[in-house]
Image: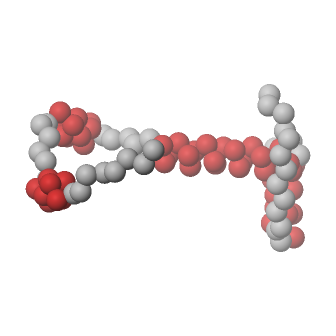
Amino acid sequence: MPTKDQRRELRLSSRDDDLITEAAGLLGLSVSEFLLDRAVADAEAIVESHRSITLSERPFERFLAILDAPVKPLAPLVAQLRRARPLKHLD
């Protein structure tokens, strides 16, 4: 288990504090354990949902087909590249 060497503080209403304290007690946890467990679980779910994409079969097959298709250069991008000045290297 990693060393707990960081500290967070938060301000909350008496109502929220009472509710959190009751919920932690019902689970047999300290308020700190309850808050940390919930925060870490929610943080992991949020980060995972932003790091991955899940597709059903049809969209996944379409996605793969697009990836496998030959690249078609975009005319405006090609035109811009032709107009671009050469880069100067600064040493």
User: Which quadrant holds the C terminus?
Assistant: top left
Residue at the (19%, 54%) spot, across then down? 81
Q: Left or right: where does residue 55 sit relative to residue 83?
A: right
Question: Which of the two residues, 36 or 86, is positioned nearer the viewer here?
Answer: 86
Residue at the (11%, 45%) spot, across then down? 72
Which quarter of the figure has residue 58?
top left
Count of marks placed on residues: 0
Question: Which of the two residues, 13 or 64, is positioned nearer the viewer here?
Answer: 64
Q: Is residue 8 above or below residue 3?
A: below
User: Which quadrant holds the N terminus?
Assistant: top right
- Residue 18 percent across, percent down from the top left: 86, 63
Residue 58 is at least partly visible in this image = no
Residue 3 is at least partly visible in this image = yes
- Residue 83 percent across, percent down from the top left: 17, 59
Question: Which of the two residues, 16 or 26, is positioned nearer the viewer here?
Answer: 16
- Residue 20 percent across, percent down from the top left: 81, 57
Q: Left or right: where does residue 65 sit relative to residue 34?
A: left
Residue at the (89%, 46%) spot, across then down? 30
Question: Which of the two residues, 68 or 1, is positioned nearer the viewer here?
Answer: 68
Q: Left or right: where does residue 38 sit relative to residue 58?
A: right
Residue at the (18%, 40%) spot, across then down? 66
- Residue 61 percent across, percent down from the top left: 21, 36
Going by the picture, which residue comes out furthest to the top?
1
Colour mapping used in the image: secondary structure
Q: Left or right: where does residue 69 sit relative to residue 31?
A: left
Which quarter of the figure has residue 75?
bottom left
Which quarter of the figure has residue 53?
top left
